Amino acid sequence: MATGSVTVNLTNMRIYPAIWVIVMALLAGCVNDIKVVNKLTSQTEATQEEAKNLLVVYSSKGHVKVRVTSPRSIRYIDKGYTEMPEGGHVEFYNDSAVKTSEMWANYGRMYEKTDQLLARDNVRVVNTKGETLESEELLWDPNTKKISTNRFVKITTAKEIIYGDGLEANRDLSDYKIKKIKGTIHLDNEAVE
């Protein structure tokens, strides 16, 4: 019978139990509140998006029809509109990509389902002839290509100033109808400021 010796390394045996004790202590200390876990891992969607220097371009058959710019916008996803609380500027173009008119307002709102644009507070539209439409509120409808309002309006042309309530007009002011004219001032070829 052969005699031999068995060598046991006691150093390794002492380390493994110590590691197991540390791992078990760490695992025991990890207690998660299910409400906190659900809140952190939930798939909630944002209800609004905010942007600076907004640019929206409406085009048809590769031609720009309308450009909307605003220094700041807030899109309310659940409400279906984008708000421009610091105002905005709209440029309207004809089929030849020539700018026909511009609109400015201190506040704007674009509706996603209809693509309509509501402009409020110090609204002004100016066409290439220098004719000006002023109102406190205008609605532009891209489907009808019309600007409309039920509010007070003032239209200034080279020949006259017309005041009234309510309006429907082409976006370049080439054709407009004031619903209730309150007054007209004829200018006799004088420049109006």
Image (spheres, rainbow, N blue to C red):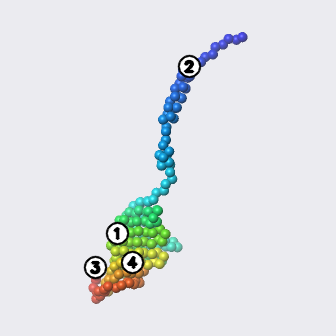
> Can you tell which of label 1 and label 4 is closer to the viewer?
4
For the residues bearing labels 3 and 4, Cβ distance under 8 angstroms = no
Mark found first going from the N terminus, 2 or 4: 2
Residue 155 seen in this snapshot: no
Mark found first going from the N terminus, 2 or 3: 2
**Quadrant where the image shows the C terminus:** bottom left
Name the amino acid type tagged 2.
Answer: Leu
- Spatial CA span between label 1 and label 4: 16 Å
Residue 186, given in percent of the width and then of the height, sits at 29, 88
- Spatial CA span between label 2 and label 4: 92 Å
Along the horizontal axis of the image, is 28 left or right of 2? Answer: left
- Residue 193: give its label: 3
Residue 175, given in percent of the width and then of the height, sits at 41, 84
Mark found first going from the N terminus, 2 or 1: 2
Residue drawn at the location 43% of the way across and 65% of the way down: 82
Q: Nearer the viewer, residue 1 or 97?
A: 1
- Residue 149: give its label: 4
* Label 1 packing within 10 angstroms: few (<14), some (14-19), many (20+): some
Question: Which residue has dot 1 on it?
Answer: 106
Residue 168, given in percent of the width and then of the height, sits at 41, 81
For the residues bearing labels 1 and 3, Cβ distance under 8 angstroms = no
Element at label 3: loop
* Label 4 packing within 10 angstroms: few (<14), some (14-19), many (20+): many
> Can you tell which of label 1 and label 3 is closer to the viewer?
1
Mark found first going from the N terminus, 1 or 4: 1
